Image (cartoon, rainbow, N blue to C red):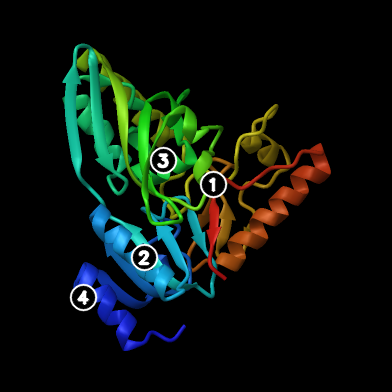
Amino acid sequence: MDINDSIYKNIKKIVGEENILINEPMKKHTSIKVGGNADIFVKANTIEKVKAIYSLSKKENIKLSVLGNGTNVLVKDNGIRGIVLKIDIDEIDVRKEGNKIYIRAGAGVPIIKLSKIAYENSATGLEFAIGIPGTLGGAIKMNAGAYGSEMKNIVRNTTYLDNNGNTRKITNLEQKFEYRSSIFFKIDGIILESELELELGDKEKIENKMKENLISRNEKQPLDKPSCGSTFKRGNDFITAKLIDDCGLKGLCVGGAIVSTKHAGFVMNNGNATAKDFIELTNQVKNEVYDKFNKNIELEVQIMGE
């Protein structure tokens, strides 16, 4: 895409020159360290700036892609055309009402940070998120979860920008949370902020649960190489990683992508992997699992770009 001076100047007026990167390698902004260039990479740290960038993209007919922390995302090798908008809204507000603790936070706040803030306020319900590396916005969209809990259990409401550029607030039920899914996969909306509803708990018990979760994560998950986290969704009646393991696929490589030898549900960047490597390897895994067990497994990772 040709970036004309007028568009650049308008974006600069909204977010400042320091928050604009041209032809930016997306491997710098994804946890798996893979991906081609974005035409324009823009960081916005307020709702007003997000709305202004969205309006500009509509007015100029520029494709707009939204990114959080890039932890569950694979960008294809040819990159992303148009604007990649990184949501950096980081306001946090905590209030207590009786035995309830409400945390309202911007979509760009790391979910690990929110877990720690909950602990500091003796709020229970976010212990499961201590090891999840994404942002609140991504966690809401994906209905992130671990250790038997998920976001749908604690989200009170979410404010988002709709496809007309209007802000809307929806309740927990209206977000239609399902396993690793929400209404935000079905509508054209940008998550801006959410309010979480937690219970007052015992601070020592909360701390112990968080430590237990971190120990489990470090013992069971491969954290030594770049990845998107858990690569495949859980099956309705099967454990995906076990099927992959039973196919003997641990350690299987395509180029620089490898199925973890520690946890078969993770595909890692073993060094200089490309998105093509990742896609070819995950397709091979899916095909072998289907051939052996007649089970379709799905990617949890979101693929962007071209």
Q: Characterize the local packing of mark 4: few (<14), some (14-19) or many (20 or more) Cα atoms within 10 angstroms.
A: few
From mark 2 to mark 4, how far is it between C-alphas?
Answer: 19 Å
Kindly indicate whether the residue at mark 4 contacts the one at mark 3 (C-beta within 8 angstroms). Answer: no
Residue in the foreground of this view, choosing between 153 and 233: 153
Checking the image for residue 185, the label placed there is 1
N-term mark: 3 or 4: 4
| Residue receiving disc 2 | 55
From mark 4 to mark 1, how far is it between C-alphas?
Answer: 31 Å
Q: Residue at x 60, y 65 (%)?
A: 277
Q: Residue at x 22, y 67 (%)?
A: 15
Give the secondary structure at mark 4: helix
Q: State left or right for residue 86 relative to residue 98.
A: right
From mark 3 to mark 4, how far is it between C-alphas?
Answer: 29 Å
Kindly indicate whether the residue at mark 1 contacts the one at mark 4 (C-beta within 8 angstroms). Answer: no
From mark 3 to mark 2, how far is it between C-alphas?
Answer: 25 Å
Q: Characterize the local packing of mark 1: few (<14), some (14-19) or many (20 or more) Cα atoms within 10 angstroms.
A: few
N-term mark: 4 or 1: 4
- Amino acid on which disc 1 is placed: Phe
- Amino acid on which disc 3 is placed: Ala
Expressed as whole percent of the image width and height from the top left, the position of residue 65 reads 45, 63
| Residue receiving disc 3 | 139
Q: Characterize the local packing of mark 3: few (<14), some (14-19) or many (20 or more) Cα atoms within 10 angstroms.
A: many
Of badges 2 and 1, the one in the foreground is: 2
Give the secondary structure at mark 2: helix
Residue in the foreground of this view, choosing between 12 and 27: 12
Of badges 3 and 4, the one in the foreground is: 4
Q: How many tags in the picture?
A: 4
- Amino acid on which disc 2 is placed: Ser
| Residue receiving disc 4 | 17
